[in-house]
Amino acid sequence: MNDQQQDSGNAVRARAIAKTYVLGKHRIPVLQDISLDVSFGETVCIRGASGAGKTTLLHILGGLEQPNSGTVEIGGADVYMMGEGRRSHLRGTRVGFVFQAYHLLPELTVEENVMLPSMRLSGAGRARVEAEKRCRELLDHVGLSDRLDHRPPELSGGEQQRAAIARSLINDPDIMLADEPTGNLDSRTGDSVLDLLFDLVDARHRTLVMVTHNDQVAERCTRSMILADGVIR
């Protein structure tokens, strides 16, 4: 953990977050005055029904979608007060995303997909070599060392999510944000993927914020909260 992390006290700090979508003449309020703190090393679950705004909140916490009002800090840095360039760099170095739909590029191999977030940071030379080594180590850890040259359509759903987890860790982020990571998997495969995700988070002392509508998934986190009617309860 670096000095900035120790000084800030929180991995993620959100204050008075509000988000409203406008569709034609209609305004659709999704989030209203949400504040929360997530400490380094915590595993936190945000539960809620489909359409409650969980994904929107996760995207806002990770710097992917700007709120209408409110502030988000990652490791003490105010995400939406910085320009897009700095915000993109922060996302790339401090945050790892795991999505329900995997978001692997079908034309790339598994290895290329996992390497993708590191390309902008590593460039060429020694940094690139180290990123390739880390990629191989991660794929070995998630049980895909024999699938390096396969493409996503050749993998099962569970294998694709394992590749997505490896990709989210390639830049060694402090914070993992997971959006219904088992939503497209059967229960047995989902349990296996969750075991892997929590093992990796624990082994690397990372912070995890996960959204789900599944109470059994939520029980695996150290802290849980409910998002309903646009507010945290």
Image: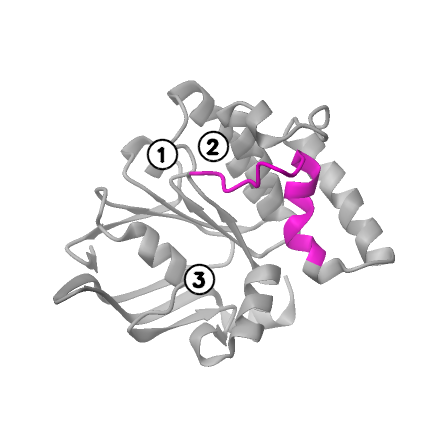
Regarding mark 3 in the picture, which secondary structure is present there?
A: loop
Secondary structure beneath label 1? helix
Q: Is residue 194 above or below residue 57?
A: above
Task: For marks 1 and 2, give the CA distance.
Answer: 8 Å
Furthest toward the top, the residue is 188
Mark 2 lies on a secondary structure that is helix
Pointer 2: what residue?
A: 194
Give coordinates of residue 192: x percent, y percent. 50, 25
Image location (x, y in percent) of residue 182: 41, 32
- Mark 3, residues whose alpha carbon is within 10 Å: few (<14), some, or many (≥20)? some
Q: Which residue is label 1 attached to?
A: 217
| Marks 3/1: CA–CA distance | 24 Å
For marks 3 and 2 on the same chain, the one whose residue lies earlier in the sequence: 3
- The span shown in magenta is 101-119
- The type of residue carrying mark 1 is Val
Residue at point 44% right, 46% down?
178
Q: Residue 30 colored magenta?
A: no
- In the displayed structure, does residue 45 sit left or right of residue 114? left
Q: Residue at x 37, y 69 (%)?
A: 66
Q: Amino acid at mark 3?
A: Leu
> Do the numbered discs 1 and 2 sit on residues whose CB atoms are within 8 Å?
yes
Nearer the camera: disc 3 or disc 1: 3
Quickly name the residue at label 3: 64
